[in-house]
Amino acid sequence: MTDLPSRVFIKEEGPREGFQIEKRLIPTTEKIRLVDALSDTGLDYIQVTSFVHPGKVPGMADAEAVVAGMTPRDGVRYAGLWLNQQGLIRAIATGRLYLEGKLTLYASDAFLKRNQNRDPQQQLAAQPELVKMYQAHGIPVRTGFVTAAFGCNFEGDVAPAKIVALVNEMRAIARDQGEDLSLIGLGDTMAWATPERIRRVVGMVQDANPDVDLSLHLHDTRGLGLANAYAGLQMGVQHFDAAVAGLGGCPFAAHAGAAGNICTEDFVLMCEEMGIETGVDLEKLAECARLAEEIVGHPLPGKVKTGGSLAALRSRIAAS
């Protein structure tokens, strides 16, 4: 427990991670409504959309309209996701997004084929060109990300040593192009992580890369999202991706159950009760979770939006 961080940094991905997988197309105005509400919670990073092929992910066909319609707040970074250079060009063209260069490698060859229609050699070869493109636009390259870092629905378990090797490859590519990766993300894309696996993989990557920070992108498909986040906190991880109300999932991951990221407000509650600062107003965030549920029109897995926060309960008890 001595490695618990005093502060965590949350990347809110609900508007992108959540709406991309909904069977019903969400109106652009409703997407903007949620983004604007999240902007008032204290979150300082919101991933608002994804610049992907509309034929493959119809729910993201209005990416430019969402970015154009939101009302930016000071101190909030609004980001988008892209999988290739075409997507990056679209994101740049909006003129309203926080842009950061990221290298991405996959621990699963089968999932890489489904997600990007590439083999590992093609994905590896694309990274130096991606760095050059970022540099041409003055975009810093500081982040690397390993997808399916804890297991895959198509290939099964992934050896931790493979994750370490992929991280080494990404860092070498960045160095060859004059860049230095300072943050490495590990994605539990298909929810194979367990607390023990988190400790094992994170520990091995930390041992091999003591000079970089780690982030975790965790899914709650099998109900272990918060337990895995807790294990990450115990390992000193400070950076977490999360989705309001537990929205989301990857449309190419073949999930059979609820596939959302860890729920932002539930994670914030856990951190607050552990004395870990988040910078987020939990009551406002819970309101956003209820709004998200209203927008999608079906129950979402987050718990705090229904059960309430302990701080609010303590206040009511004290007042009575």
Image (cartoon, grey):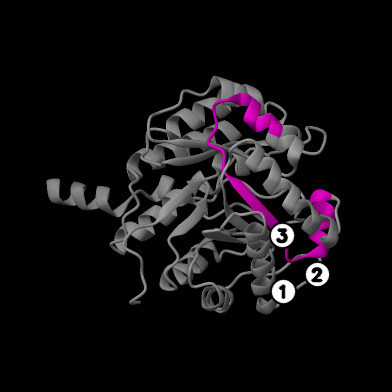
Tell me the crowding category of disc 2: few under 14, some 14 to 19, or many 20 or more residues within 10 angstroms, Cα based.
few
**Residue matched to label 3:** 105
Q: Position of residue 159 (x, y in %)?
A: 70, 78
- Picture layout, residue 37 above or below residue 180: above
The stretch in magenta equals 89-116
For label 3, the SS is: strand
Mark with earlier residue (2, 3): 3
Q: Residue at x 50, y 31 (%)?
A: 34
**Distance from the alpha carbon under mark 1 to that under mark 3:** 14 Å
Q: Which residue is mark 1?
A: 158
Amino acid type for the residue under numbered disc 2: Glu
How packed mark 1 is, by other alpha carbons closer than 10 Å (few <14, some 14-19, many 20 or more), is some
Q: Is residue 109 magenta?
A: yes
Q: Is residue 156 left or right of residue 174?
A: right
Q: Is residue 320 visible?
A: no
Q: What is the secondary structure assignment of the residue under circle 1?
A: loop
Would residue 256 be seen by someone viewing this image from the given angle?
yes
Whether residues under marks 1 and 2 lie with C-beta atoms below 8 angstroms apart, the answer is yes
Q: Which residue matches tag 2?
A: 155
- Hey, what amino acid is under mark 3? Leu
29 displayed left or right of 111: left
Q: CA distance from mark 2 to mark 3?
A: 16 Å
Instruction: Name the one closer to the observer, 38 or 142.
Output: 142
> What kind of element bears circle 2?
loop
Q: How many marks overall?
A: 3
Which quadrant of the rendered structure holds the N terminus? bottom left
Asked if the residue under mark 3 is in contact with the one under mark 1, i.e. CB atoms within 8 Å, the reply is: no
